[in-house]
Amino acid sequence: MLAPAPPLPDRLPHEPGPEPAPGTRVRRFELGDDTIDGRSMDMTRIDEVVPAGAEEVWELANVHSRPHNLHVHDARGQVLSAAGRPVPAAERCWKDTVYVPPRTTTRVLLRFGRHPDPAVPYMYHCHLLHHEDQGMMGQFVVVPPGTADVPRTLAAVVSGHHG
Ligand SMILES: [Cu+2]
């Protein structure tokens, strides 16, 4: 037998949308046909290195006539601007994937996970299945903040990708 539901609170919690702090790192990516920055997925290549717990702005420039929908593992994001128009903080929410219409640029504030693992990469990729199947995907490792000289190639293909 189900108990009666408790009354709803008068106000629901709402975390206002974050603004990028001064000096926040900005990375720009060009989304092409089935490529990111003109490249296809290579499981032996580390494309980006991200400090654990970082907040970064990723600028996603769709330079193609295809729509794309970027998904970044180990991160959640809020869209700061879409097609050149700012999104007010009150209208933002945390997202898993970010839609980037053809020939537009979307800026997203990403908040990454806190646990470093320099050995096993995470992925970022277009979530349109056909595009990701064509290799529209890159890899990044999450490192302890302040880490320098991270190898950009994996000697052997690792078996345990973060999913
Ligand atoms: Cu796509």
Image: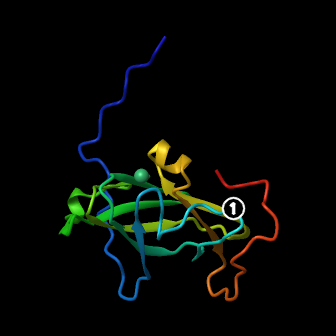
Task: Identify the residue shown where x is 48% and y is 69%.
Answer: 38
Residue that badge 1 annotates: 43
Residue 97 in view of the camera:
no
Ligand 1 near label 1 (Cβ, under 8 Å)?
A: no
* Residue occupying the far top of the picture: 1
Label 1, residues with CA under 10 Å away: few <14, some 14-19, many ≥20: some
Q: Is residue 32 left or right of residue 141?
A: left
Q: Is residue 133 left or right of residue 20?
A: right
Task: Identify the residue shown where x is 76% and y is 70%.
Answer: 154
Q: Is residue 37 left or right of residue 83?
A: right
Secondary structure of residue under mark 1: loop
* Residue 148, quarter of the rendered image: bottom right
* Residue occupying the far right of the picture: 156
Look at label 1 and name its amino acid. Answer: Met
Task: Identify the residue shown where x is 47% and y is 49%.
Answer: 131
Report x, y in % for residue 114.
60, 68
Report x, y in % for residue 147.
67, 86
Judge by depth and name the residue closer to the eye, 89 or 135.
135
